[in-house]
Image: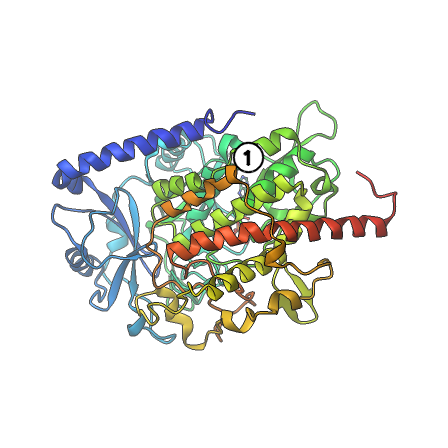
Amino acid sequence: MTTKLESPVKTQMVVTLISGLLNRDCHESTRGNLARRRRVFVQTETGCVLGMELERGDNAHTVKRRLQLALSVPTDQSSLTFGDRILNNDLSAIRNHSPLLLARNAMHRSSSTPCLSPTGKNLLQKDQSDPIEILGCPNNFARIDELVKDIVAAIKKGVDPIPVHGGLGGAYYFRNISGESVAIVKPTDEEPFAPNNPKGFVGKALGQPGLKSSVRVGETGFREVAAYLLDYDHFANVPPTVLVKVAHQIFNVNCGVNGDKIQKKKRVSKIASLQQFILHDYDAGDCGTSSFPVAAVHRIGILDIRIFNTDRHAGNLLVKKLDGEFGQVELIPIDHGLCLPEHLEDPYFEWIHWPQASIPFSEDELEYIRNLDPICDSEMLKMELPMIREACLRVLVLCTIFLKEATAFGLCLAEIGEMMSREFGGREEKPSELEAVCLEARRIIEDLNMSNVEAEEGNEEFLFDIDCENAMIVDPSQVISSDFFDQVSYPTRTSIVKVADIRPVRPEENWYKTASKLPTSLKNIDVGVRRSANDQLPTSISFVKVADMSEEQWILFLEKVRELLYPAFGNRRRATIGQRQRLGSSCKF
Ligand SMILES: Nc1ncnc2c1ncn2[C@@H]1O[C@H](COP(=O)(O)OP(=O)(O)OP(=O)(O)O)[C@@H](O)[C@H]1O
């Protein structure tokens, strides 16, 4: 295995980091020149996208005024947002090719108010820019840059994309000049429940909680890219993926928020994920799993744990038969739009009961895991995808630490997956073993009188507030009673974890304290939103918030989690041994 530092992606990150620093210096000295060159893509809640050049001296107000003229939308009651940030004035932090969202302010919105919707005539037809522009630095995606050029050449010759019929969201196969599918494009405003979903799943504006309460509508695209970027050395085989602004008449535009009428087709611009199309024979739901290589299952599982994948169902694993090797197959993981949730959820790991997941990790795999550095990963994602929310980064850091500690303890993939999955007892959803550890860690912090969970309550600017009128929020004080941890009845938990039993932290492993490098822009975030009355699909409870802690609390929290993990690992190991004994000696791997 290539070590992390030798990895091409890693090397690229280092280069990006250095050039980022250089650019920052450069930015200080020639702030005006750089500012003049920036191009941003503003998306309205209904999905309409407008590319615009930021001019010297532009601020949020001047940009909004220009948007009002261009889109004929009332922008005085709206906010310009970029990930977690509301852009009130200064735009100097906005990088070239950033996607911004123009959304109605929470206080001016109720479920009956229509979304911001452009009324400017022929606006969409006026966009004469390139059919596809990569968001972010195209040099970082040299491989996909060629692919984009092939697609653009094909579009110019009239080779149209083909809509994908499966799935809940809008997706399109884009082709090369020979008519072969080379990429799958998924517009962010055609996701399930997004305003322009072509399959009838509509009703929400961009930025509202979506199919999962922990993933907002319109935010699956950058998660697809994040999974690819985190897949160092192409370890798990995630196909190359980028975020693009793409214009074509094939895309769907619904009339009105209910999505009942479709406009006559015309060229529209969208923000979308673009992923290389991989020729395959079927997906993991269409065949037996016994031919799946142990290493492929392990590698995909390792990625799923790191990114807390809530959607690894069989359809999201493509299977390709390998030539000349009887029965041998390659696995290709796709569809990572529901990873990196803003709070812990119930993950979905199709592989959890496959025999391969119970086989111990190989030395190569363990080394890959040892080389993972969650702080580096989150810095890299912030650099490449500056719109990513801090809550997602915290979930990444927490899960990577969990993976590293669990494998150091000697747990296998199935055991790790089980510790992250929730038990369903009757109609009740119970926290997973990982969540129970996190809840206990938060209780300890509160006991230490360091918690400030309700700080800065009521900031109206946070977008989730939009839907909170009828939302059920799990109050941590209700679930984290002093004896909660002891009372949670897990079939697999055989002894009570006490803080006094905690193994001391190994001094050489204090690297995670560099978590203090994480930024402190974590205000106003309440990620514990439960389903609102009009949700169309059941959503799961949020037991553990990660984004409402101050930086100091977050570091202490990670420290406590890490300490509490070891007794929990012991319990899990005893449970596994108990299960194997019950199954008998015929069930060996
Ligand atoms: N990289 C790829 N290469 C080849 N085919 C792909 C690729 N990505 C997706 N597909 C195909 O497109 C279909 C839809 O893709 P995907 O599952 O990502 O979309 P979705 O709308 O998010 O689906 P779902 O609602 O099932 O989650 C897949 O079932 C698969 O057949």
Q: Position of residue 400 (x, y in %)?
A: 52, 44
Structure colour scheme: rainbow
Q: Is mark 1 within 8 Å of ligand 1?
A: no
Q: Position of residue 33 (x, y in %)?
A: 13, 38
* Residue where numbered disc 1 is placed: 370
Q: Amino acid at mark 1?
A: Arg
Residue 157 higher or lower than 514, as above or below: above
Residue 377 found in image quarter: top left
Residue 453 found in image quarter: bottom left
> Which is nearer the eye, 362 or 198?
362
> Which is nearer the eye, 113 or 382?
382
Please report the residue visible at 54 percent of the width from the left and 62 percent of the height from the top: 439
Q: Position of residue 4 (x, y in %)?
A: 49, 29
Residue 358 found in image quarter: top right
Residue 258 shown left or right of residue 362 in the figure: left
Please report the residue visible at 70 percent of the width from the left and 22 percent of the height from the top: 324
Residue 287 shown left or right of residue 54 in the figure: right
